[in-house]
Image (tube, grey):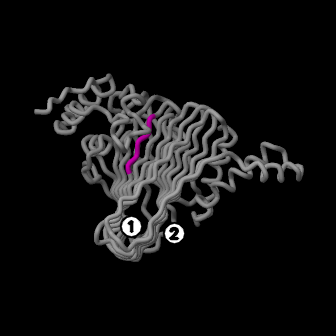
Amino acid sequence: MRQTFPVRLGAAEESLIAQLKAAGADQAAERVTVAGLPTRRVEAYHYTDLKTLLRVIPPLAQAANEATGTALRVPGAYALSIVNGAVLNAATAPEGVKVGKTHGGVLTNRDDVIVNVSNALAKETLSLDLKGAIEQVVQIDHRIEGEAGHVADATKIFVADDSSVIILETFSGSDAAHVGNHATYLALGKNAVVTHVTIDLSGRATSHFATNEYHLADGAQLRTLVIHAGSGLARTHLFPKMEGEGAHADVTGLNLVSDGQHSDITMETTHAVPHTSSQPLFKSITRGRSKSVVQGKLIVARDAQKTDAKFMHQGLMLSDEAEILSKPELEIYADDVVCGHGSTCGKLDEDSLFYLLSRGIPKAEAETMLVRGFIAELIDPIEDEALNEALQGIVDGWLLGK
């Protein structure tokens, strides 16, 4: 008989277990008690050892008495706010946007501690029903205010058949050692066209966790863009699922990582039916003693013939101390597919830099031009002009060290 031994729990795990039990989530608490936070032995967390990286879980955040304001304003956007897990009342919604509140978690149950904690602790959920061609960007601003707090919030979005919308989610808050666990469930109807952008602009002391789950019906077209540019520890887990024939997803992301930061984008895309496609593209830019992680798995079900899926990760190292870790995976059960993956990593091209310098362009400006060119294929497809400019501003601010 195989003997099992309990794991040694740290302060963060003890705090998390107490919070789960207080919320009546005994099953989730028991899971943390038995397994603890994921370590390198858990494949999905091999490069992001939460037992080592997450030493403290602060108390659950209380209602905010004051707000710092959004970290990113997009002119013309319809703005909604979730502060310390509470959905705030919003202005009158534009035509085609129905705003509501529900309760409880929104994610599909998985063997993942972040998902389980989100479903257990999320109390108030923002629900959106979107119909028609919505011209305004719909912005959901998540903030954690006040003293260090632990927040789990959730958003559930349904986009009707033949509808189109750009959705922006931003994450920020006060400069304290917060832990944020944010969940988004996004379902696309038949032939819906959706762009979903998520940007972490939290303070350096914050630990940011986000889980985005996507379900695509027949002919649905999805473009995602994840940007990590704030928290000291950031991890976004993406779960796109192609459930209708003709569905396509451009799943993209960008880690902007400076000295002392650890940013992780992990993706698991599932092609469940025939004649679907995806084009995941992720980029990492690191400087100082920092670490960027990108993991991407493409799963093709047995019945998902004629799948076309290609994963790519490209890394750019601006210092010798930085680390970029990449793990592409293919899990294919069908036999008539076109699938592939690739990963590259390097420094700024010396020939291109020399060419710009030879034209009299200062070195700092020349390097900035090359970095902008490196990430252009992620930002250029964002068609809304105001949002595109805002994203360019985030990149420029990071390059200037702001």
| Range shown magenta | 207-211
Name the residue: 38% across, 67% down. 130
Horizontal and vertical percent position of residue 151: 36, 38
Residue 315 within the segment the image draws in magenta: no
Horizontal and vertical percent position of residue 234: 47, 40
Name the residue: 34% across, 49% down. 154
Q: What's the amino acid at mark 2?
A: Glu
Query: Which residue lies under the disc numbered 1?
Result: 130
Left or right: residue 29 versus residue 396 is left
- Residue 65: image quadrant is top left
Q: CA distance from mark 1 to mark 2?
A: 11 Å
Horizontal and vertical percent position of residue 338: 44, 70
Assess whether mark 2 and mark 1 are in contact (beta carbons under 8 angstroms): no
**Is 401 rendered above or below residue 155?**
above
Is residue 374 in view from this perspective?
Answer: yes
Residue 208 within the segment the image draws in magenta: yes
**Is 9 rendered above or below residue 114?**
above
Left or right: residue 344 versus residue 362 is left
Q: Secondary structure at mark 2?
A: loop
Query: Which residue lies under the disc numbered 2?
Result: 135
Horizontal and vertical percent position of residue 365: 78, 46
